[in-house]
Image: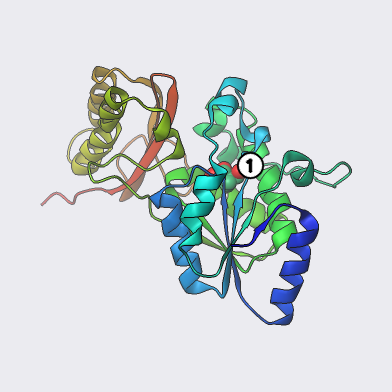
């Protein structure tokens, strides 16, 4: 399996693809790959002639050093997982290669979409995401790029980035993959003890409660019940909000469709999840 580590290797490979008029799908990751990532890679593989998966733990998007240090890194296992998939190559640069001295980057204003929810709780996080994805898009120039809906706000930020810098890449949103008991797949789940993992299921239970009661009971009452489910399981909520999926503004009352977003600490591990829910039409 081809594993590139330098920008030059990528540039040469990309030029050859263009000469051969091959379509390129791109899946950016920070490694510690799970079935959620693999579902993006499989989709990219079905829809393109070649797929590039980047694996780079981006220090610029971590607002806490301890979180960066604890982030799982397992490149050999990641390569072994991807080896089974057709037409996939890997780009696993080091930091100097990702951010070479003198490489121009003009930061963009994210506006409100970058300052609510994750943006409010993790200052600088989205600036770091924009920085690395800008460099990756500029270097790789994919036809399509694949992102998971678990990071719903990140997806909105990426769409804005794509427009702002005029990359013209087709951004494909892929549904959140869950374990059979509902826990959203995340590389961070590897850090949970068995007991913590069990407690973390409260996030899915809370989101499901909101989904089942949207439009039926007052929005504040439903939100409070959801908070209670998570807190009773011993997690510390960072935020739990019911928002408009387009603007990410908090909903004061039920709309036709809303997005419930949660971030909560399960022990040391910060987990995020979300669920779209339509208001049930009352007879
Ligand atoms: O979603 C992620 O894993 C990261 O934020 C991304 C898009 C790979 C950028 O580092």
Q: Could you tell me how many numbered marks the image carries? A: 1
Q: Nearer the viewer, residue 35 or 242?
A: 35
Image coordinates of residue 112 in percent, x first then y, are 58, 38
The relative height of residue 134 versus residue 95 in the rendered view (above or below) is below
User: Where ligand 1 lies, by quadrant?
Assistant: top right
Q: What kind of colouring is applied to the model shown?
A: rainbow
User: Which quadrant of the rendered structure holds the N terminus?
Assistant: bottom right
Q: Position of residue 266 (x, y in %)?
A: 37, 23
Residue 274 vs residue 200, the one in the foreground: 200
Residue at the spot of label 1: 129
Question: Residue 249, how many percent across, how many down?
Answer: 46, 38
Residue at x-position 69% and y-position 82%: 20
In the displayed orientation, state which residue is furthest to the right: 102
Q: Is mark 1 within 8 Å of ligand 1?
A: yes
Picture quarter containing residue 230?
A: top left
- At 63% across and 62% down in the image, what residue appears? 2
* Left or right of residue 172, residue 271 in this image: left
The percent position of residue 55, horizontal first and vertical second, equals 60, 48
């Amino acid at each position: 399996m081809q594993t590139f580590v330098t920008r030059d290797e990528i540039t040469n490979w990309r030029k050859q693809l263009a000469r051969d008029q091959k379509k390129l799908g791109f899946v950016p990751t920070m490694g510690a790959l799970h079935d959620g990532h693999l579902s993006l890679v499989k989709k990219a593989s079905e829809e393109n002639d070649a797929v590039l998966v980047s694996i780079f733990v981006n220090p610029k998007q971590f607002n806490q050093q301890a979180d960066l240090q604890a982030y799982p890194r397992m490149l050999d296992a990641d390569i072994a997982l991807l080896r089974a998939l057709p037409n996939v190559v890997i780009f696993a640069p080091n930091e100097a290669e990702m951010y070479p001295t003198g490489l121009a980057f003009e930061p963009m204003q994210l506006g409100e979409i970058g300052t609510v929810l994750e943006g409010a709780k993790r200052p600088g996080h989205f600036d770091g995401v924009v920085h690395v994805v800008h460099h990756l898009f500029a270097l790789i120039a994919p036809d399509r790029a694949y992102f998971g809906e678990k990071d719903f706000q990140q997806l909105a930020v990426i769409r804005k980035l794509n427009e702002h810098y005029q990359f013209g890449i087709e951004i494909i949103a892929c549904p959140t993959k869950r374990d059979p008991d509902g826990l959203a797949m995340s590389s961070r789940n590897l850090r949970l003890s068995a007991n913590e993992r069990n407690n973390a299921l409260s996030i899915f239970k809370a989101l499901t409660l909101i989904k089942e009661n949207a439009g039926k009971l007052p929005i504040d009452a439903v939100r409070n019940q959801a908070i209670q489910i998570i807190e009773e399981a011993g997690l510390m909520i960072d935020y739990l909000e019911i928002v408009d999926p387009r603007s990410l503004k908090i909903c004061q009352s039920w709309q036709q469709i809303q997005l419930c977003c949660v971030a909560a600490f399960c022990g040391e591990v910060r987990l995020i999840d979300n669920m779209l829910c339509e208001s049930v039409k009352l007879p």
